[in-house]
Image (cartoon, rainbow, N blue to C red):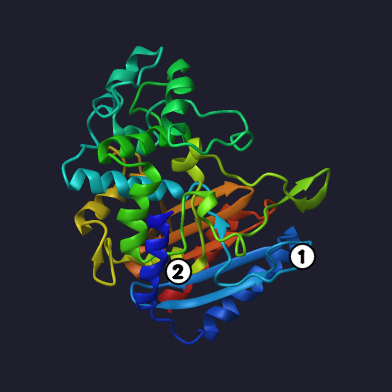
Amino acid sequence: MKKFFFSFCISLMLVPLPVRAADDNLDNIFSPMIEQMMDENNVQGFVFSVVSKDDVLFKKTFGIKNMYTKEPETNESLFHMASITKTFVGTALMQLQEVGKLNVDEPVVNVLPYFVMVDGRYKDLTIREFASHISGMPDFDSDPWHNPQYDEEALERFVRNFISQKFLTHDPGTTYQYCNTGYELLGDVIAKASGISFEDYVRENIFIPAGMVNSTLLLQEADMTNLNSLHELKDGELHVADIYPYNRMHGPSSTLISNIDDMARWVQLNLNGGTLDGNRVLKKETLDAMWEPALGQFDNVGFSWHRRMQNGHLTIYHGGNDGFKSYIIMIPDLDIGFVMMSNTDTQPYHEFAQEIADKLIEYRGN
């Protein structure tokens, strides 16, 4: 908690990101789209921001945090970011490579000697293969949020007890197959290589230098007064979920909690080549390498980020989908990106994000 308090205190010294006056064109483009999507899909709360390297071009909140209390969404509202957490794992791994504490092309067993599988091919599995979803590791198929674990041994225990009993579904490095399981293992790689917990490492080496002072990977550190409620369908009716999606043994794949201002900073840091407000989180050449096709052959995925050509432009993106819906898309050659966050599982997040990207490309081209 002391580290989190420290990160809160330094926020008083941070210079806020420049925010231009609300761009009427962007408001006219996106507000009707968002309001229509929310109405058609019974989405309760939604926040949205468009940024360039140097400016927050547009930011707006829509709807409510809780369908029962009717509290409005604000810039301070906290959302479960789900799989967008993985982009922080990738960044942490590349940081550790920059300082010589690991090599992302070395076998995982070099960092985690305890890692074993009944499938003998595990000995050659590399950090990069897990980060790019090409390891062949099967995903977990049970509900990860019941019976949450909060202790620091949760990650290693998950790797020992769950992963050890699995067989690979294909030869490593041959097939893309999205896998949350591999990211839990990578979280423990970060912990063992750095000598501190995964959550502490990300806080000290990414959140703090990036000025993301409202973000945490630990639910118990979140400001509960700003925490959104999760809304989900049950028997055809929308209601507030009984269980919040948090479990420390799944921290690296999906437990980031953040708000729209912090996530806008994350997009800007990446558009700026790994640096924001004079604080460097990654070297530009390292970040550029993360956006390259995995192993030079998987055009849809880089290192923790996904890739897609859209209307002639390379987009770098990641979504989060576990009740809460979140999405980041960056269009580097147009110096623009956006983040959207929702508290309702009925939102068509992937399709809607692509529609927004289409509109941004059209807007930036004019």
Q: Please tell me how crowded label 1 is: few (under 14), some (14-19), or many (20+) other residues with Cα within 10 Å.
A: few
Q: Is residue 71 left or right of residue 5?
A: right
User: Residue 361 has which mark?
Assistant: 2
What amino acid is labelled 2 in the image?
Ile
Quarter of the image where one finds residue 265: bottom left
Vertical relation: 171 (above or below) 26:
above
User: Residue 41 has which mark?
Assistant: none
Indicate the position of residue 341 as horizontal and vertical percent values: 57, 60
What amino acid is labelled 1 in the image?
Thr
Task: Please tell me whether mark 2 sits on a helix, a strand or a loop.
Answer: helix
Indicate the position of residue 219 as horizontal and vertical percent values: 54, 50
Vertical relation: 52 (above or below) 164:
below
Indicate the position of residue 68 as horizontal and vertical percent values: 79, 62
Which comes sooner in the sequence, label 1 or label 2?
A: 1
> Mark 1 sits on what residue?
69
Disc 1 and disc 2: Cα gap in Å? Answer: 38 Å
Which residue sits at x=39%, y=78%?
16
Q: Quadrant of the N terminus?
A: bottom left
Task: Please tell me whether mark 1 sits on a helix, a strand or a loop.
Answer: loop
